Amino acid sequence: MRPRVRKTIVVIHVISSVALLGEVWALTVLNTAAALTEDAGLAHAAYGLMPALVFAGGIPLSLVALATGVLLGLTSRWGVFRHLWVAAKLVLLVAVVCLGMFLFDPEGMAAATAGGQAADDARQWSQAAVPATQALLLVTATALSIFKPRHKLRRTLTPAVTAAQ
């Protein structure tokens, strides 16, 4: 890959990853505010805003970060599964996506608080824990990008290499 193209992809990857972290942090703040407030209308408004953040920010940003990360891994000396830190970043991003898909339910929380009803405290805090966990995973991925631990993944010999020996 040409250096200019590679740098452009790196810029897109960094921007989408950092923006994803910002979006997840916004969800964490909104969830925490909704869980702490005594005003059911404010909680309902916060939960009602979250799907817009997820669909306008979280989903496209995570897909861009994933696609550019895999592309960079495939076209660089780091590889996707050659170095532990690159593979760990991939696993962390997939975990962030899975947490959002399977455990985060702002629409359900908005429905639960409709009409000024208070949502169950345990459910509110479990919903606040999901984006907080996502933020922690994204911060870990960012730290891995900066420190780049030099551990390589174990390589198995291919049959062609084994036959040549």
Image (cartoon, rainbow, N blue to C red):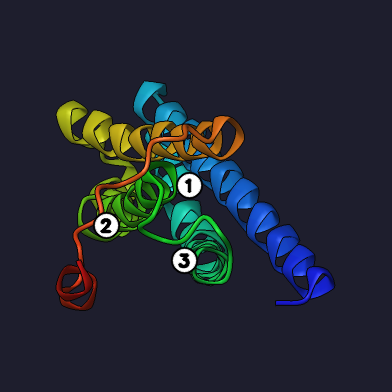
* Disc 2 from disc 3: Cα separation: 11 Å
Residue at left offset 46%, top offset 35%: 150
- Percent x, y for residue 142? 55, 37
Judge from the rendering whether residue 45 lies leftward or rightward of residue 105; answer left or right: right
Q: Which mark is residue 140?
A: none
Residue 55 to residue 118: above or below: below
Label 1–label 3 contact, CB within 8 A: no
Residue type at mark 1?
Answer: Ala
Marked residue nearer the N-terminal end (1 or 2):
1
Looking at the image, is mark 1 or mark 2 nearer the viewer?
Answer: 2
Give amino acid for label 2.
Cys
Q: Secondary structure at mark 2?
A: helix
Give the Cα separation between the discs numbered 1 and 2.
Answer: 25 Å
Q: Secondary structure at mark 1?
A: helix
Which image quarter: residue 158? bottom left
Q: Position of residue 146 (x, y in %)?
A: 61, 34
Q: Is residue 145 left or right of 138 when viewed as pictured? A: right
Tell me the kind of residue under disc 3.
Ile
Q: Earlier in the sequence, mark 1 or mark 3?
A: 1
Q: Residues within 10 Å of mark 3 (few under 14, many from 20)?
A: some
Q: Which mark is residue 59?
A: 3
Q: In this figure, which residue is indicated by the disc labeled 1?
A: 45
Q: Residue furthest front?
A: 165
Residue neighbourhood size for the residue with mark 2, other residues' Cα within 10 Å, grouped as few (<14), some (14–19), many (≥20): few
Quadrant for residue 131, please give it: top left
| Residue plotted at (48% across, 67% down) | 70
Q: Quick one: label 2 or label 3, which is nearer the N terminus?
A: 3
Residue wearing tag 2: 98
- Quarter of the figure with the C terminus: bottom left
Whole-number angstrom distance, CA of label 1 to CA of label 3: 21 Å
